[in-house]
Amino acid sequence: MSDVWAKLEGHAVNGEFPLIRHLGGSTHSVVFLTQSAKFARAELALKLVPAVPALAQLQLARWRASAALVHPHLIQIFDAGHCQIGGRHFLYVVTDYADQNLAQLLERRALTEGETREMLAPVLDALASLHDKNLVQGRLKPSNVLVVGDQIRLASDTIRPVSETGRVSNVQSLYLPPEASAGTRTAASDVWGLGVTLCEALTRKQPAGLRSDKLILPPELPEAFRGVVTRCLSPRPQTRPTIKELQVWTRSAQWVASQSAPVPSESGPARPENPVAPSSARRFAMGLAVIVGAVTLFGIGWATIRAPDARPAPVVASVPTPKPKPSSELLPTMSRVTPADAAGTVSQPDSVPTSDESGEAAAVNEVIPEPSQRARQSIRGRVRVSVRLIVDPQGKVFAALVDDAGPSRYFEKLALEAAGQWTFPPATSRQRVMLVRFDFTRQGATAKAIAVE
């Protein structure tokens, strides 16, 4: 098709959209710069794909449905239809003109952690909107993360309904999850594409072993992202995090960073070493200059949450404001479920809130999960689940993130829900990170909290 694409420049699609300049393409599609008085845009993009009779009507229906979507982080579709150029039949779609895409940037360098987080926020916003409407982006990859003006946007011409099945595509791509081979797309499919894209954005490399049981991440992938990428690339769709969980994860990291902001001095406001960076999209268009100021603090804040040895992927939960139980109500429960060989591992709720020499942190309110009898009988030895908590100055949990999930999703969920209801003594520090370790045995459960320095 490359010879065909080269000859199309200078033609006009249906006498309305001139093919002004070739912008890029592949073996199955091409994009041109165009314009239209009808849409009052000096610059638009027009994509051409060969018309396959069996699929043409379905593809046009998808594009026209996507044209009704209006979102600040989705490419706007203005028109779509059939055309004929040089005796060949094509489908065309007219969209916003993008200044640059992530794939073009990655040809020169990888993103920093701060740049990746700023890119991630609008991407997750767009995906959340699609998934709420039972739609998927369908082909999430660096070339489909674009910049329009000062906005980061996702390509819209690949959007389709959730769980749509049909003819299996012959296109082989590591951005597509294993279940795509059956012609199925779900919200979890977008999460897979996001995982590959995040890894590539930070390292300029794709993970190895994506089509096997042994996932190998590039060694240069930052520790703060290794757990998230691993979870996104789970071969089982139901175990991948949802977009809303990923949004909570990014907000939690941002909250920690904001609590680390410089404190004004008597001589005037403290100034960071560098000014606050401009918007993400503008930095993409400028070649993405080095992230500084608040973005640097943002990355440092998340590094505090994820210790270097925290290998498992995080599960994130939004945490409601806990309603503390009186110590008289909690004490019998803890007495009942504390095994004899684990005596002393749970702080008494009416004790003075201090930390002992081992680093254990006393809590005001401790909630111990109660597994079902059937679940307890399935345990051989001990099941440990660790949860990291972001604790605000009032001692309430702002967010809970699974640090070590253990071997069971059931016990992981119990631990995450219980940890989110813990409270701690108020403190003058801006933010604290606590690690709560739950041990499940056949006798019951115990827990202890450790302050993370």
Image: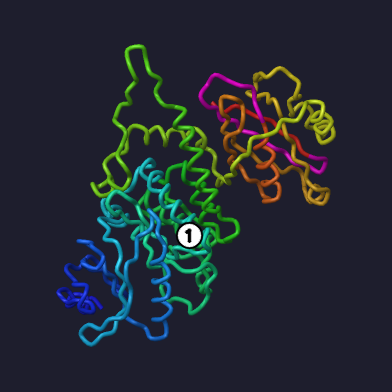
Question: Residue 121: x and y, percent?
Answer: 42, 47
**429 vs 102: above or below:** above
Q: Position of residue 221 (x, y in %)?
A: 42, 46
Q: Quadrant of the C terminus?
A: top right
**Crowding near the residue tagged with mark 1, few <14, some 14–19, many ≥20 C-alpha atoms within 10 Å:** many
Which residue lies under the disc numbered 1?
130
Seen as rendered, the residue at the extreme bottom is 87
**Residue sitting at the far top:** 266
Query: Callout 1: helix, strand or loop?
Result: helix
Q: Which residue occupies the foreground of this view, 224 or 282?
A: 282
Query: Between 119 and 229, which is closer to the camera in this rendering?
Result: 119
Q: At which x and y percent is residue 337? A: 82, 36
Image height of 326 relative to 307, above or below: above
Check if residue 85 falls in the magenta segment.
Answer: no
Residue at x 29% of width, y 31% of height: 275
Q: Amino acid at mark 1?
A: Leu
| Image-quadrant location for residue 322 | top right
Using the rendered view, name the quadrant where residue 155 is placed: bottom left
Residue 446 at x, y percent in the picture: 75, 35
Picture colour scheme: rainbow
Left or right placement of residue 12 versus residue 159 in this view: left
Q: Which residues are magenta?
A: 423-444
Q: Is residue 439 magenta?
A: yes
In this picture, is 102 found above or below 333?
below
- Residue at 34% in and 32% down: 293
Quadrant (top left, top right, bottom left, bottom right) of the N terminus: bottom left
